[in-house]
Amino acid sequence: MLMIKAIVRPEKTSKVLKALFEAGYIAVTKMPVVGRGKQRGIKIGDVTYDELPKEMLLMVVKDEDKDFAVTTIMEAARTEPKGAFGDGKIFISPVDESYTISRGSKEL
């Protein structure tokens, strides 16, 4: 299993969640986050905004579903036509174990 952490623009979150749902990925955790990427925020005049609002989406997928899930997120989160700085980032991590609390069972 793999954990996908996608950090996307807040205005793209609904589109990404809809695309994931339509692709069969219904289990997603969403949380608001702030941060900056390589561009170090946005400078407007003398003011630098280095804590930009984003949304982080967390989901666990089977190893063989990784490429499809990542492509689904990228296509929905990218600004048109070719994307832009600040569109987000996707991180993939292994998940060694998973448990369902209500049933007290280990997921396979």
Image: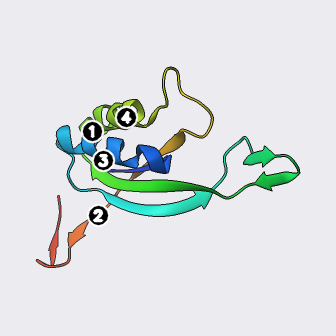
Whether residues under marks 4 and 3 lie with C-beta atoms below 8 angstroms apart, the answer is: no
Secondary structure, mark 1, is helix
Which amino acid type is marked by label 1?
A: Ala
Three-letter code, disc 3: Leu
Give me the C-alpha separation between circle 1 and circle 4. 7 Å
**Does residue 86 appear left or right of residue 41 in this picture?**
left
Vertical placement of residue 98 versus 81, above or below: below
User: Which is nearer the N-term, disc 3 or disc 2?
Assistant: 3
Q: Amino acid at mark 2?
A: Glu
Q: Amino acid at mark 4?
A: Ala
Q: Which residue is mark 2?
A: 97
**Residue 35 position within the rendered picture, expressed as x and y whole percent measured from the top left:** 63, 56
Circle 4 crowding by C-alpha within 10 Å: few under 14, some 14–19, many from 20 = some
Q: Earlier in the sequence, mark 2 or mark 4?
A: 4
Residue 19, label in figure: 1
Left or right relative to 16: residue 84: right
Q: Which residue is mark 3?
A: 17
* Contact? badges 1 and 3 (CB < 8 Å): yes
**Marks 3/2: CA distance?**
25 Å
Residue, x 37% and y 34% (percent of image)?
76
**Label 4 to label 3, Cα distance in Å?**
9 Å
Quadrant of the rendered image containing residue 65: top left
Query: Which residue matches tag 4?
Result: 76
Q: Residue at x 88, y 51 (%)?
A: 46
Q: Secondary structure at mark 3?
A: helix
Which type of secondary structure does the marked residue at label 2 adopt? loop
Q: Which mark is residue 81?
A: none
> Does the rendering let one see residue 104?
yes
Q: Earlier in the sequence, mark 1 or mark 4?
A: 1
Q: Which is nearer the eye, 15 or 67?
A: 15
Q: For residue 1, say whether it is visible.
A: no
Q: CA distance from mark 2 to mark 4?
A: 29 Å
